[in-house]
Amino acid sequence: MKKISLFILTLSLSFHLFAQDNITICQTSSTESFSRLASFSDFKDEHANPKPFHYTEQAGKMMTFKTSDGKEGHAYLVKANTDIDNYIFVFHEWWGLNDYIKQEADKFWHAFNKNINVIAIDLYDGQVATTRETASELVRSVSTARAEAIIKGAIDYTGNSSEIATIGWCFGGGWALQAAMLAGDQANGAVMYYGMPEKDEQKIKAINFPVLGIFALKDSHITPEVVNTFSDKMEKADKDITIYNYDAVHAFANPSNPDYDKKAAEEAYNKSIMFLKRVLVKD
């Protein structure tokens, strides 16, 4: 009788712990899910250390702004040559706001004939990684509260009348989507490169802007199944979603990546520019 009682007690406890784990998984946000990936060795292995690069022909400059938690945020700002209230928010990969990202910000500025404001937002508070081990640590150190405070501060910096589109890669791909959601009625669109998509159907229902997703078929973590689930939820909620899948690996658009796919990266970049111009440039 004691053995049966002990078995029932053990079974009950195991079920309770299993249920608790499932609740935790269900409640984990998309950005927190990505942070958890950063601790896995196979995920780190997908990110070769970036090639050294120093960008000297910078069109913008670093700046600070007040964040909603009473602190300061940092960003690389390229101002439009005309008086315009349109902005592109750029979100860095897990390496941080390095010279590669500053170069990308300048490229967007030039693609709009210098008639756009570009802000590359630093979610690492001034830290930059040069190894995947450090990048993994930095990703996991980012709290949702602090990241959202930085993004809200950047939105406030642009003013209430600004129109905002976002773009980001990897870690920044997920945050590009989240930033557009935080921007509310000021959001005109979001481009996410192989970032963790939103999982919460209630949050997806609140999306009021077009989304362009650039993903890799050989990505072993942001898998085609993950992407398809997101796409299906977006379509079910009658949202504007366009997905392009490339026969490439994670981070294929990063020129510092030894597995950089130049052809796919250029095609994805052109599609991103067309999308950004469609949502930001008014006739």
Image: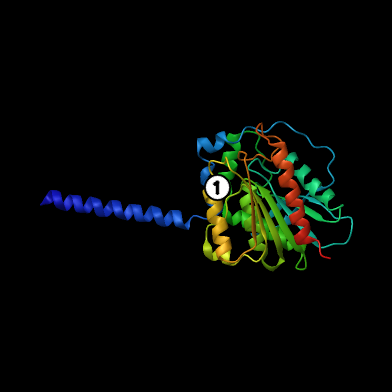
Question: SS of the residue at dot 1?
Answer: helix
Residue 157 in view: no
Say which quadrant the C terminus sits in: bottom right
**Image location (x, y in percent) of residue 56:** 83, 37
Residue 130 in view: yes
Name the residue carrying label 1.
224
Q: Residues within 10 Å of mark 1 (few under 14, many from 20)?
A: some
Taking the spot 52% from the left edge, 49% from the top edge, the residue there is: 225
**Image location (x, y in percent) of residue 263:** 72, 38
Q: Quadrant of residue 255?
A: top right
Taking the spot 57% from the left edge, 53% from the top edge, the residue there is: 197
**Image location (x, y in percent) of residue 46:** 58, 36
Q: Is residue 238 left or right of residue 84?
A: left
Closer to us: 63 or 98: 98
Taking the spot 56% from the left edge, 36% from the top edge, the residue there is: 44
**Image location (x, y in percent) of residue 192:** 65, 51
